[in-house]
Amino acid sequence: MKIRKAVIPVAGLGTRFLPATKAIPKEMLTIVDRPTIQYIVEEAVTSGIEQVIFVTSEGKSAIENHFDYNFELDMVLKEKNKISLGQELEEISNLIDIISVRQKKPLGLGHAIWTARHVVGDEPFMVLLGDDLVLNDQPCAKQMLDLFAEVQESIVAVQRVPMNETYQYGIVEGEALERKWTHQVHRMIEKPAPGTSHSDMAIIGRYVLMPEIFDYLGRTTPGHGGEIQLTDALLALSNKRGMYAYEFQGTRYDAGDKLGYLKAILAYGLNHESLGAPLKAHLKQLVVDL
Ligand code: G1P
């Protein structure tokens, strides 16, 4: 089984970033020279995904427009002889086949994924969460798809976090397998209260899911925060047919958090072909001045 489709939920209100996100979607906030959502879509594309399904809500049309072709803008750029800029914009619109579905009520991440069930159909698929950026030569999604090619079962991406931060994540309890960085999932808890889990393996927003997840999502009742949680449906699925947790290689940035977003800007800036060196020189000077 090959994974062709990726669901990217973008329906969230972005309240953590107000007032910046009052009139623009949080996924359109810029990191260096492109909106965060473009990094996520590029990760999916370079990993071999053929179709992206955005789960959107009202006020998110800027995201769809970003990946669309803008005829008028193209004409203006051609008239002004800005050919390479025009080509760059065309490349974005040619990136991938994109479909949007609407999540009509903000009932939680699990409900958002369930909303995409008819477009995904009866095949395994990926989920990428827009807040989680992973910087690495080999994209996180590709690492997971390589593992899927071996195990043909659901996989959640995890990273170790300090114990006093586990309450912010879905937490996985599992057993390390012989394959490096890979664990068999035993239990999952969404945002555990302090002391209720001894695991430090936090779910990061990359999943490979078997289509059966939709049956479980359809039956999942509201959990943490009164929302339909993906983690609760994953637990039910893992009890039935097994699931892997994978400690991906790379650095993850929480672009949905103000400090995480700033760190991401610095990391992606330092990694940038032409801006990296002058930014580094500037940061060195700043440290001296501090
Ligand atoms: C979601 C998931 C959570 C996961 C996190 C990763 O939570 O529900 O299990 O650990 O993403 O970013 P959210 O951050 O949307 O509250």
Image: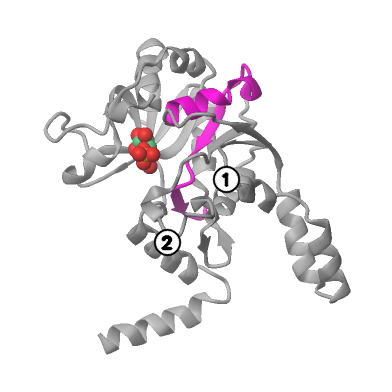
**Numbered label tally:** 2
| Local crowd size for mark 1, using a 10 Å CA cut-off: few (<14), some (14–19), many (≥20) | few
In the picture provided, is 77 more to the left or to the right than 7? right
Residue 115 lies in magenta, yes or no? yes
Q: Is residue 181 visible?
A: no
| Local crowd size for mark 2, using a 10 Å CA cut-off: few (<14), some (14–19), many (≥20) | many
Secondary structure type for disc 1: loop
Residue 11 vertical position relative to residue 135 in the rendered view, above or below: above
Q: Residue at x 54, y 35 (%)?
A: 145
Q: Residue at x 51, y 58 (%)?
A: 29
In-front residue for pair 64/45 = 64
Give the residue type at disc 1: Gly
Q: Identify the magenta region.
A: 109-138
Q: Which mark is residue 264?
A: 2
Quadrant (top left, top right, bottom left, bottom right) of the C terminus: bottom left
Disc 1 residue: CB within 8 Å of ligand 1 = no
Instruction: Report the coloring of the rendering.
Output: one colour
Q: Which mark is residue 189?
A: none
Q: Quadrant of ligand 1?
A: top left
Give the residue type at disc 2: Ala
Q: Which picture quadrant has residue 86? A: bottom right
Q: Could you tell me residue 133's position as x and y percent?
A: 46, 51
Q: Could you tell me residue 66's position as x and y percent?
A: 67, 53
Task: Mark 1 or mark 2: name the one nearer the start of the chain.
Answer: 1
Q: CA distance from mark 1 to mark 2?
A: 25 Å
Residue 269 lies in magenta, yes or no? no
Provide the residue designation for mark 1. 59
Q: Residue at x 55, y 55 (%)?
A: 28
Q: Which picture quadrant has residue 186? A: top left
Secondary structure type for disc 2: helix
Residue 72 vertical position relative to residue 207 in the rendered view, above or below: below
In the picture provided, is 208 more to the left or to the right than 189? right
